[in-house]
Image (cartoon, rainbow, N blue to C red):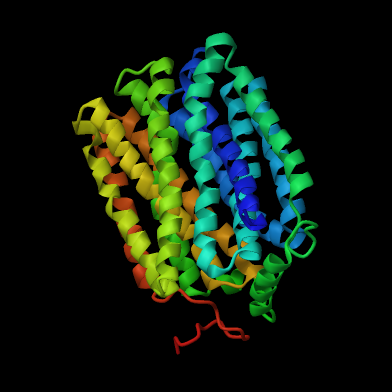
């Protein structure tokens, strides 16, 4: 296996740990609530605390990784979020849980910008979507492991141990990262062939200008990605944080049942990560333009999302199946949206653009999550919530069609126009 694919797997493991960390609270919420009682709105507030700091660190983390480099930047990010995850074990009040959740978001916000930058350094365009699919597949690994692992821990230990164990996993990964990861230029085990392939990619980006945030925000395509991510992640964070609680509240599950069944949609999301990235890369290899390959795959991903409207109206077995289809489509979509900044922008701006896009997604998660908590606590029920969530990806795809008319690299000049767009 080429070295760059082993690096993709390494980064995928970091993303797996991040999703395991963020799922600990939603899956363990029933046990936590026995010590720290929580309403639906307070549960929403905990997720908003995570997403607020996550949003700002996603934007700032992109700049941080651009400034420090991928190796050092990811090291600092992982150490911070692992300690923040472990701090949940010390919480005795809602306010302490809120503080830990805020710190966890601040650390994890830098993960995907660092991953996107690594892809732009190591992978050419015809492989980048597949690489991001492997990395994004880590979201499914972490989320699949979370329900049965937490159920197992809770059968023997207090819920506080869950956060200590997951925090320790992050520190262990950091040691692996420091031993295994170097930039393409510095890596001691890179082959001559792979070094030449990366050299050609690097030279193609030579002379690319640097952009600050204000310049990036004057680019219509950047806004298109931010708005699309705001809409689609509104739905995704609802699914991610509220699925266990929905199963507890509306379907009568206990922690054992959640541990037995809640991993299934996340497994489907992992397949979506791989299929979405692979399919787009396959179309590029079949001589489709990058623009067509990305948009065809994005459109197909968005098309399956309205199926979620059926969840409140079917038996629980069918509800799990529909969740699985929606998770598949969402993570196929997410893989593709997060590789588009590398298609559009030079390497030295990818981290910053990915940060802005992630910021938009997290803010969408906050807005929709707070709305969900309010609606549920005021008697509206899950039917309205699923109806709203089911249409968000379709609208997001229409935004991309309108605001990102052509996916191609920025012109190598001092203007902000696209080649061929004038």
In which image quadrant can residue 81 be found?
top right
In which image quadrant can residue 262 be found?
top left
Left or right, 371 with reference to 281: left
Note whether residue 339 is visible: yes
Residue located 52% across and 72% down the image: 344
Q: Is residue 284 above or below residue 161?
A: below
Q: Position of residue 359 (x, y in %)?
A: 54, 54
The answer to which of 200 and 391 lies nearer the viewer is 200
Left or right, 66 with reference to 262: right
Residue located 56% across and 60% down the image: 354
Q: Position of residue 163 (x, y in %)?
A: 62, 25
Q: Is residue 197 above or below residue 45?
A: below
| Placement of the C terminus among the 4 image quadrants | bottom left
The answer to which of 337 and 92 lies nearer the viewer is 337
The answer to which of 124 and 98 lies nearer the viewer is 124
Q: Position of residue 12 (x, y in %)?
A: 58, 46
């Amino acid at each position: 296996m080429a070295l760059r694919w082993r690096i993709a797997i390494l980064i995928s493991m970091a993303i797996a740990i991040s999703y395991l960390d963020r799922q600990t609270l939603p899956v363990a919420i029933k046990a936590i609530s026995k010590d720290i009682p929580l309403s639906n709105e307070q549960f929403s507030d905990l997720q908003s605390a995570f997403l607020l700091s996550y949003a700002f660190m996603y934007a700032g983390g992109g700049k941080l990784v651009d400034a420090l480099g991928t190796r050092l930047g990811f090291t600092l990010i992982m150490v911070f979020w692992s300690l923040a995850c472990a701090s949940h074990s010390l919480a005795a009040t809602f306010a302490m849980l809120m503080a830990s959740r805020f710190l966890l978001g601040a650390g994890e916000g830098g993960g995907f910008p660092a991953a996107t930058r690594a892809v732009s350094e190591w992978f050419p365009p015809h492989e980048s979507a597949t690489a991001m699919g492997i990395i994004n597949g880590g979201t499914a690994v972490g989320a699949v492991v979370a329900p049965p692992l937490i159920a197992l821990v809770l059968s023997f230990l207090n819920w506080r141990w869950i956060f200590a164990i997951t925090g320790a996993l992050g520190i262990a990964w950091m040691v692996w990262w420091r031993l295994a990861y170097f930039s393409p230029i510095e890596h001691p085990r890179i082959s001559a062939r792979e070094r030449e392939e990366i050299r050609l990619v690097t030279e193609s980006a030579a002379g690319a200008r640097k952009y600050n945030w204000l310049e990036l925000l004057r680019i219509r395509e950047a806004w298109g990605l931010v708005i699309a991510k705001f809409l689609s992640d509104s739905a995704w964070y609802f699914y991610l944080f509220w699925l266990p609680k929905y199963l507890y509240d509306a379907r009568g599950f206990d922690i054992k049942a959640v541990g037995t069944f809640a991993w299934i949609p996340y497994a489907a999301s992992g397949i979506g990560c791989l299929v979405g990235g692979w399919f787009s890369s396959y179309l590029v290899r079949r001589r489709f333009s990058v623009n067509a390959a990305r948009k065809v795959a994005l459109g197909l991903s968005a098309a399956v999302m309205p199926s979620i409207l059926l969840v409140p109206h079917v038996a629980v077995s069918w509800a799990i199946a529909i969740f699985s289809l929606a998770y598949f489509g969402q993570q196929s979509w997410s893989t593709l949206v997060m590789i588009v900044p590398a298609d559009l922008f030079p390497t030295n701006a990818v981290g910053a653009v990915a940060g802005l896009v992630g910021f938009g997604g997290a803010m969408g998660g906050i807005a929709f999550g707070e709305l969900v908590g309010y609606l549920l606590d005021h008697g509206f029920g899950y039917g309205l919530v699923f109806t709203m969530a089911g249409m968000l990806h379709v609208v997001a795809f229409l935004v991309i069609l309108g605001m990102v008319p052509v996916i191609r690299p920025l012109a190598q000049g001092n203007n902000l126009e696209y080649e061929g767009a004038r």
